[in-house]
Amino acid sequence: MTPSERLKGLATFVAVAEAGSFTAAAARLNLTNSAVGKAVARLEERLGQPLFDRSRRRLELTDAGEVFYKVCVRVLEELEAAERVISADEIEPSGRLRVDLPATFGRMHALPALLDFAERYPQVLPQVSFTDRFVDPVEDGLDLVVRIGGGDTWPAALDYRYLGHEELVFCASPAYIALHGAPQSLDELWRHAAVLYGRADGSTSPWLIDDGQAPLARQHVEGRIVLGQAEAQVAAVEAGLGIGQLATWLVEGQLREGRLVQVLPQLATRGLPLHLVWQRTRQHVPKVQALIAHFAATLGIGPRAGV
């Protein structure tokens, strides 16, 4: 079987999966029902297992069919994007653009930038997910990922751009300081109530202390309250439950408006890096190039030392 025949089979299978019937897919592809049915049957024979459950009124994908469908969609979109780039017909960025953003940073900072991008390029169709877990752009079929954290090296299939480090500061509410006073030293800080961030595995994030040595000191403290969501942690600090170590991108509004007060500013600490990450094979696709440039111009945080 030639590569073109294989691709034709993939397109037919995707059409059936999306249309929900052979008849609807045949109409979409301008083929006969028989031709569509034979193409899917040949594909199932080649793969050695059924792709559709035919026992119900509407065709439904089997588990194997679900997996194969995702792969086929990705392959066909990659082929279409490659053809547009090579033919130089695509002057303006266009097409579906899959992006994954960190939950809180994404909602607060990356999403407004992405909405501005979508308005600027109306032919681009963003499909956005929000997760804090590690995602693999290749495995998950993503065009671009924004991540806080991660190292300076990435798998060979990926490329990345560094956008700076977050800055962590100790904060408390004016009401808390009025009641308990502001710590004047590191020793005093340990005697105050702590509002901590809790990880999914049940552990708590330590406070990072910049004592002028490398690596940074990691201090595990007992928390007055532990929260597994960044904005909930900010709310608890605002409510006067204790002192929290928070990223400036998370609390810049509260600090500016006086709802939070920075304490021990000399202990402001460099936090995690911010990166854009994308598939190396897609970096020349106009829509991906355009979003990389847009995010690089709008999402920088903290210092960009060494850049």
Image: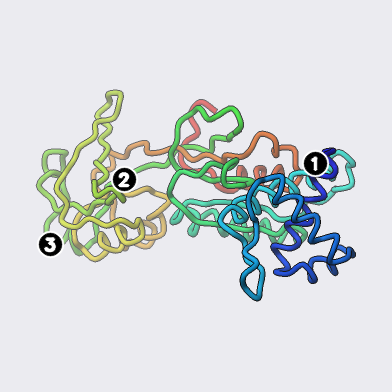
Q: Three-letter amino acid code at disc 2?
A: Val
Residue with the most extreme left position: 191
The residue to which callout 2 is attached is 169
Q: Disc number at residue 82?
A: 1
Q: Give the mark, 2 or 1, whose residue is nearer the N terminus.
A: 1
Q: Three-letter amino acid code at disc 3?
A: Leu
Image quadrant holding the C terminus, namely: top right
Question: What is the C-alpha distance between the residues marked 2 and 3?
Answer: 21 Å
12 or 121, which lies in front? 12
Q: Is residue 121 left or right of residue 85?
A: left
Question: Which one is in front in this view, the residue at disc 2 or the one at disc 1?
Answer: 1
Residue in view at x 84 percent, y 63 percent: 34
Under tag 3, what secondary structure? helix
- Looking at the picture, does residue 75 appear above or below residue 174? above
Q: Three-letter amino acid code at disc 1?
A: Ala
The residue to which callout 3 is attached is 179
Under tag 1, what secondary structure? helix
Instruction: For label 3, count other residues whose C-alpha is less than 10 Å away and answer few (under 14), some (14-19) or many (20+).
Output: few
